[in-house]
Amino acid sequence: MLIDLTTFTTANRTNTDEKFQEVTTQTIVHDVIKVIKSAFDLSLIDLAKYQSIWELNQTEKISYFTILTKNQIPVSTGNLYFEPELAIIDDIATHSDHQKQGYAKEMLIHLLKQAKQANYQYAGLVATPHGLPLYQKLGFKKQNLYFNVYTMHYPK
């Protein structure tokens, strides 16, 4: 899905208990992993990638990697990759104890504002059926994509 950032104007809600924090320490990486573990079916997720993203960001800024806390408790995560022509949003996740409270929406709005500030015209993401209504409500439009799927066969 794509959104035209030149027309995006939605603001985050104002809540002094909520804070966005860029992932800049090992401790925050562990907080991200806790949120991811709680939010997703882990059979499809390589948790080691979050450590790798953080390490790469130390030397080469490949993404804006962030976490949202409420009263200093990690509640939601998100990542914005800086591709040449498109900002790519990934890893929007909300801890299971905090779902259905608007945190994914807050994270998405925050990431879109970051992409806009970085002078991107468009941001994109791959939508799950669960997230589709939110993405459409914020202005994302469906796109036709083609993916190659590769299967790895490991020796036993």
Image (cartoon, grey):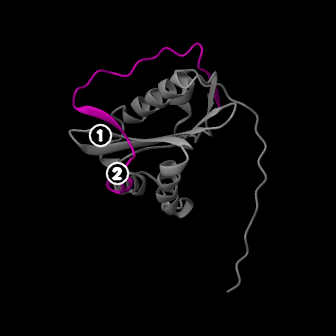
Picture coordinates of residue 67 (x, y %)? 38, 42
Is residue 146 in the magenta section? Answer: no
Instruction: Using the numbered discs, state the Cα–Cα distance from disc 1 to disc 2 in whole angstroms.
Output: 11 Å
- Describe residue 129's horizontal placement relative to residue 92 as left or right: right
Are there few (<14), some (14-19), or many (20+) residues within 10 Å of tag 2? some
Placement of 82 over or under 148, stated as above or below: above
- Describe residue 153's horizontal placement relative to residue 26 as left or right: right
> Which corner quadrant holds the C terminus?
bottom right
Residue furthest bottom in the image: 156
On the image, numbered disc 2 is attached to which residue? Answer: 28
Q: Secondary structure at mark 2?
A: helix
Q: Amino acid at mark 1?
A: Thr
x 46%, y 53%: residue: 40
Query: Quadrant of the rendered structure where residue 89 is?
Result: top right
- Describe residue 19's horizontal placement relative to residue 111 as left or right: left
Nearer to the camera, 35 or 115: 115
On the image, numbered disc 1 is attached to which residue? Answer: 69
Residue interval drawn in magenta: 1-29
Q: Amino acid at mark 2?
A: Ile
Picture coordinates of residue 73 (x, y %)? 25, 45
- Describe residue 141's horizontal placement relative to residue 61 as left or right: right
Picture coordinates of residue 95 (x, y %)? 35, 47
Whichever of callouts 1 and 2 sits on the residue coming sooner in the sequence is: 2
x 73%, y 75%: residue: 153
Are there few (<14), some (14-19), or many (20+) residues within 10 Å of tag 1? some
